[in-house]
Image (cartoon, rainbow, N blue to C red):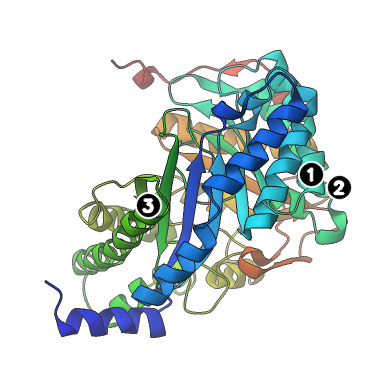
Amino acid sequence: MYTKFDVLETIDMVAKEHLDIRTITMGISLFPCVRDTAEATAAKVYDLVCSRAEKIVKTAADLSGEYGIPIVNKRVSVTPVSLISAAFPEKAPLIARALDEAAERLGIDFLGGYSALVHKSAAPYEKVFLDTVPEVLASTKRLCASVNVGSTRSGINMDAVRRMGGIFKQAAALTAAEDGLGAAKLVAFCNAVEDNPFMAGAFHGVGEADCVVNVGVSGPGVVKHALEQIPDADLTEAAEMIKRTAFKITRAGQLIAREAAKRLHAEFGIVDLSLAPTPARGDSVAQILEELGLERVGGHGTTAALALLNDAVKKGGVMASSRVGGLSGAFIPVSEDIGMIEAAEKGEINLDKLEAMTCVCSVGLDMIAIPGDTPAETIAAIIADEAAIGMVNNKTTAVRIIPAPGKCAGDWVHFGGLLGRAPVLPVHDTDSSKFILRGGNIPAPIHSFKN
């Protein structure tokens, strides 16, 4: 039973500490849409998405009003389009346009699933599909893309990694007027999950039900505020405080997720209990780490503090929901977190430190701007490094990196909204091209051979 103190505490979390439901994401299977032609398939995709997700925006508004908890984003994820367009991969952009038009009609924020799963090898239709990604991202407004290039079970497809280096470059170049925004809607994964509600990497996995609702909760400000109440506690007590706070945050997400699924006539999927920051002050994962005692995120001790935070969030949240999934933990995007932005501006954080932090956080190198003249092979090498961390540690890792056209280290990119702004970080000027151009596969680690 909830007491008046629970109610007052939740009100404070919303009013003063930036508690929100970061996203309600409806996952929709597109397999029933496959027809003999691309044109017929695209038309059916548009109709199905509009029909299934017709009430998602209204439902989110109703729930937000009834429960008093902001629901920031309304999103849709779909079956990887490379599978739906396998018979006519060169015409996959027709499906992309249908999805983007459906997203606009519905008023949702983003639609994810222009995706391919090539972690072991790429079929001929998938290779053609990958060629369409840069132009699709440049010509659509709300569509997001992802490519899974590796997994713990299969190793890393280095031919796909090499392709992705060029795809990031092209997507940024085609959106140069927007500081390379196309690349900000693209993710390269290792160990991609099927139930992720967060963009830009969301897609509806083939193992999922026909239509599901996944919810992503967020509350960096709530966790920071909780830690402010125990400034002299040791780290054991701090971890316990984070666990208790994550439990409360996740309970709110569970309530909204189940009610949303019921009203939208969909299955309840999962609650993703990630701490996802925004550029707003007081809503920062980096500032949580600084509350734990770091003078500035990026300094020595940052990786240890992040490991404590990530683990405590998962332990607290997993007890609060019947189904926890997605990415779950703490995100460290540079452009979307005011603390990370300020640390990068002061030179306290760089690509090498960010890579180290990804060993213990939720995902990987996220929303990082680099010089526009960075070679495609260098970008591919960055992707390979991050994929190796995911493969060996049996965790999801990702790269969402923006080679900002015409920008040099120290310049700034500005995307606005939740995507924020960031200084352009330097990359190593050593040549990795011979390594990348070897191609082939990096074999799976020995511990992957389990049954």
Q: Which residue is mark 2?
A: 174
Name the amino acid, label 1.
Answer: Ala
Q: Quadrant of residue 167?
A: top right
The CA span between labels 2 and 3 is: 38 Å
| Side of 112 relative to 267 (left or right) | right
Q: Quadrant of residue 248?
A: bottom left
Determine the residue positioned at 62% across, 56% down.
106
The image shows a total of numbered marks equal to: 3
Determine the residue positioned at 42% across, 76% down.
65
For the residues bearing labels 2 and 3, Cβ distance under 8 angstroms: no
- In the image, residue 199 sits, relative to residue 2, either above or below, namely above
Q: Quadrant of the N terminus?
A: bottom left
Sequence order check: which comes first, mark 1 or mark 3?
Answer: 1
Determine the residue positioned at 24% across, 58% down.
316
Q: Which residue is mark 1?
A: 171
| Side of 20 relative to 229 (left or right) | right
Q: Secondary structure at mark 2?
A: loop
| Side of 234 relative to 97 (left or right) | left
Q: Could you say which is closer to the camera, residue 99 or residue 441?
A: 99
Q: Secondary structure at mark 3?
A: helix
Q: Quadrant of the C terminus?
A: top left
Q: Which residue is mark 3?
A: 261
Q: Crowdedness of circle 1 by 10 Å Cα count: few (<14), some, many (20+)?
A: many
- In the image, residue 125 sits, relative to residue 115, either above or below, namely above
